[in-house]
Amino acid sequence: MATDNVLEIKNLHTYFYTDGGVIKAVDGVDVELRRGATLGIVGESGSGKSVTSLSVMGLLAGTKGKIADGEILLDGDDIVKLTKEQQRKLRGSKISMIFQEPMTSLNPVMKIGDQVAECVLQHEKISKKEALKKAEDMLRKTGVPRVEHMMKEYPFQLSGGQRQRVMIAMALVCKPEILIADEPTTALDVTIQAQILDLMNQLKKETGTSILFITHDLGVVAEVCDDVAVMYCGRVVERGDVKTIFANPSHPYTKGLLGSIPRLGDAGKELKSIPGNVPNPKYMPKSCKFAPRCPYASEKCREEEPGFFQIEEGHISRCWLCESGQLKTDHVEKAGD
Ligand SMILES: Nc1ncnc2c1ncn2[C@@H]1O[C@H](COP(=O)(O)OP(=O)(O)OP(=O)(O)O)[C@@H](O)[C@H]1O
Ligand SMILES: [Mg+2]
């Protein structure tokens, strides 16, 4: 299949079948990750970002979650249809993931060098010595200090930023086609966060790995992403390349998120937050999911859910206002205004 998309998520529905009812965590998501690019998935807590990434990783087993419908095409092949064993083989070799809190993914009783080497040994038939050499080289690339020493240390002896670098080394040591980074810097302080984002940008350039970057922070999206998909209540509401979305956000939810980014010179000013809360998944409106919080909502928005409207080439928005062309750049509220 001739495509420059390494990953295509098509009409993905991932539901949790709980005792209290069905939770439609991901309810019709379509996104494309271009080869060598970074796609940001952004949205408030509970919008379905992590469930989307767990669906791609085949990591829903052990939860009540199940992919109810849709396709996840990796190089054109649907990985939803693979067996558990085939999915396990993909993890680490073709798709790797780094999580928000590295301590939960690192083995506390295994030395750092052995952990990174173990990732190599799971996918390559080479000697332990060769694997350790690869681990050391990769750790050096991530900029951890005193690599030889750190190889023999345990996770608890490292700082949060160092642990996250180790996670990045583990994720990239097998040269995956896709790296999924789920809030990889949220638990870190801002200086370390900036260093880790720089590192990811640099390694992406070196390795050509495509990245699915999950965050609730549009500021981080601006730093590292080429494209962005904004999620709300299990759906994508706006998609486009980062420059376009920042210059011309068209969905009121995206505008709300942009309004809540602090900017230089805003000291003392109150940050705008989006009023109201994400609806309870059990009582999801049938209409536009954002209508109850939307300052522009009309009767139609409260009755019927819109599809996507094209704003410009490659930029789409799930909003009735875009149909009539009412929501144009001159409506855009600049952050802090
Ligand atoms: N194991 C689970 N069982 C039941 N419901 C779940 C489970 N995991 C997630 N959900 C539900 O799915 C929805 C989406 O959750 P998800 O973790 O994807 O959100 P998120 O966008 O990653 O949020 P955050 O920014 O807080 O990480 C939420 O309503 C959540 O309660
Ligand atoms: Mg999450």
Image (cartoon, rainbow, N blue to C red):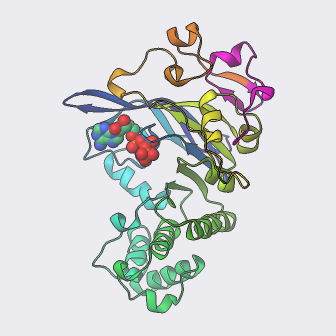
Q: Is residue 56 visible in this depiction of the protein?
A: no
What x and y, as percent, mark residue 126? 43, 78
Query: Is residue 336 a member of the stretch shown in magenta?
Result: yes
Residue lying at the far left of the rendered structure: 19
Viewer-closest of 182 and 219: 219
If the image is split into quadrants, where does the C terminus sit? top right
Question: Above or below — where is 229 with respect to 123?
Answer: above
Q: Report whether 86 appears left or right of 331.
A: left
Task: Please tell me whether residue 208 is drawn above or below residue 85 in the rendered image.
Answer: below
What residue do we see at 33% from left, 64% from top?
104
State left or right for residue 215 relative to residue 157: right
Q: Is residue 244 magenta?
A: no
Q: Position of residue 13 (x, y in %)?
A: 42, 30
Indicate whether 15 appears above or below 166: above
Q: Is residue 123 left or right of residue 229?
A: left
Report the residue at 57% width, 76% height from top.
Answer: 142
Q: Quadrant of the N terminus?
A: top right
Residue 310 on image: x %, y %:
72, 23
Magenta stretch, residue numbers: 311-337
The quadrant holding residue 109 is: bottom left
Viewer-closest of 122 and 57: 57
- Where does the image place residue 138, in percent across and percent down from the top left? 54, 77
**Ligand 1 quarter of the rendering:** top left
Tell me, yes or no, if residue 292 can be seen here: yes
